[in-house]
Amino acid sequence: MFNLDKQYELLKSSPDKVYQKWRNYSEVIGKRIILSVAGAEVEGIAQDFDENGFLIIRTDSGTCEKYMSGTIKKVYK
């Protein structure tokens, strides 16, 4: 079985395991970022991904916002 087939089977049987693997590979979770989306910039802490894969950013005002797409322009260390 190809690796993609194995990953698909894992996704069907244990989506939480796939989510955790995906989250562990992220280089932005827990870091301050600038996201460029629809001609605007959003700055805040990348909190997590939701169950649909949207990036959740906690802005400086304390609100959490979800983004389906955009370009991460900067990741602060």
Image (spheres, rainbow, N blue to C red):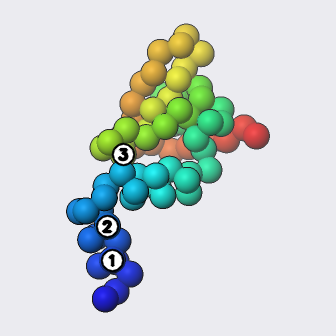
Could you say which quadrant of the image residue 44 lies in?
Answer: top right
Residue that mark 1 sits on: 6
Where on the picture, by quarter, is residue 54?
top left
Residues at badges 3 and 2 in contact (C-beta under 8 Å)? no
Query: Residue placed at 65% from the left, 32% from the top?
Result: 32
* Residue underneath mark 3: 53
Q: Position of residue 48 (x, y in %)?
A: 49, 37
Camera-side residue: 21 or 27?
Answer: 21
Circle on res. 10: 2
* Label located before the other in sequence (3 or 2): 2
Badge 1 vs badge 2, beta-carbon distance below 8 Å: yes
Q: Label 1 to label 2, Cα distance in Å?
A: 6 Å
Q: Is residue 14 visible?
A: yes
**Closer to viewer: mark 3 or mark 1:** 1
- For marks 3 and 2, give the CA distance: 17 Å
> Would you call the spot at circle 2 few (<14 residues within 10 Å), some (14-19), or many (20 or more)?
some
Secondary structure at badge 2 equals helix
Q: Nearest the camera: 63 or 36?
A: 63
Three-letter residue code for mark 2? Leu
Name the kind of residue labelled 3 in the image: Gly
Q: Report crowding for label 3: few under 14, some 14 to 19, many 20 or more residues within 10 A (C-alpha).
A: some
The residue lying at 28 percent from left, 70 percent from top is 8
Left or right: residue 31 versus residue 70 is: right
Q: Secondary structure at mark 3?
A: loop
Q: Quadrant of the C terminus?
A: top right
Tell me if 53 is positioned left or right of 23 in this view: left
